[in-house]
Amino acid sequence: MEIIIMKKFLTIGEPLSVFSSEDLNASLSETKHYTRFLAGAELNVAVGVSRLGLPTEYVTAVGKDPFGTSIMQDIKDAKIGTDFIDVMEQYPTGFYFKQRVDHGDPEIFYYRKGSAASHYDVNNLNKIDLSEIEHIHTSGIMAGISEEGRITTETMLEKAIKNNIRTTFDPNIRVQLWSSEEYMKKILNQLAAKANIILPGTNEGKILVGSSDPETIADFYLNQSEITDTVIVKIGPDGALIKNKTGLDQIISGFKVDQVIDTVGAGDGFAVGLISGLMDGLTYEDAVKRGCAIGALAVQSPGDNDGYPTRDQLSKFMERG
Ligand code: KDG
């Protein structure tokens, strides 16, 4: 009997606790009631991919404090590997507050400066056996939290190139994390040039390449690097454009949603669908359709990743169309 060993998904980033407001449309300074959830863009992706049953590793550092302990437990409960998570006594675990609004994007406020993850030691990447990994997901957030985070993200992408591992890069613009827009733009586009698949949104395109036209954004990233072969531009509820170097140039339509509760985590949900789809052997078109479905499920719940589906929930939602 032939034994097939499934290769794993790996991502790297900063885990956070998010305090999500219960007080609809109150500003953060007015809000009195919050519920705490697990957050962190790349961790959201890990949670979603693992929930679909794919072996998942997460690379990070947490503090030796209550949020660090609770995040570690949530990660174990989500069946994500903890071998590459450092616990640092001297630094805290980050957290943030998120407003609850009935339309648009919520106000957010971070307490993450000097966090354990922002002190992640890049040398720890040498402990990872990359022969077990099929796909690595990175985002601009880890690069924005500190110089160590930037170097770690870049090194991870370079290691992936050397080891022939497929990579995704989501710019995930968080202006609060960067010293200036110019610097952010430079670093995010430099990192994008080291990844195979880039996942910008149209609003991000406006800042990073000076246009919110999906075709223009895709062409910019395809032309700037030999390594980038595919760009998937997220156009919100309307779906996404896939463009690659072998001629695919197609818009995949999104899913209608009755009630939007919280938009945070939708982009990560999209990445979950795309990455899990590619790991399942789907075509880009089908993987992007799955991404649109998980993005649509994500906006219907208050936490950053609690709306991501199991296999069963995903197929029911996709059948409904
Ligand atoms: O994409 C969702 C993230 O924004 C959220 O979980 C928190 O990582 C986070 C961040 O930096 O905003």
Image: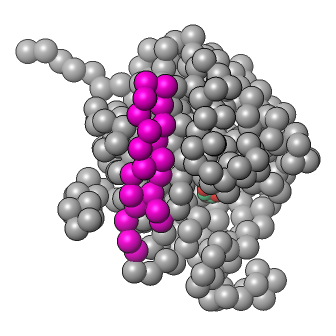
Residue toward you, 280 or 56: 280
Residue 151: quarter of image? top right
Instruction: Note whether 213 is above or below 56 in the view shown.
Output: below
Q: Would you say residue 241 sits in the magenta stretch? A: yes
Residue 298: quarter of image? bottom left
Q: Would you say residue 58 sits in the magenta stretch? A: no
Residue toward you, 128 or 139: 139
Q: Residue at x 49, y 25 (%)?
A: 245
Q: Residue at x 39, y 51 (%)?
A: 252
Instruction: Note whether 1 is above or below 298 in the view shown.
Output: above
Classify residue 128 as left or right of residue 147.
left
The tally of labels here is 0
Residue toward you, 7 or 268: 268
Q: Residue at x 67, y 88 (%)?
A: 25
Q: Residue at x 58, y 85 (%)?
A: 102
- In the picture, the quarter occupied by the C terminus is bottom left
What is the x, y in percent for residue 91? 80, 45
- In the picture, the quarter occupied by the N terminus is top left
What is the x, y in percent for residue 270? 46, 52
Magenta span of residues: 237-257
What is the x, y in percent for residue 64? 70, 48
Instruction: Note whether 221 is above or below 276 in the view shown.
Output: above
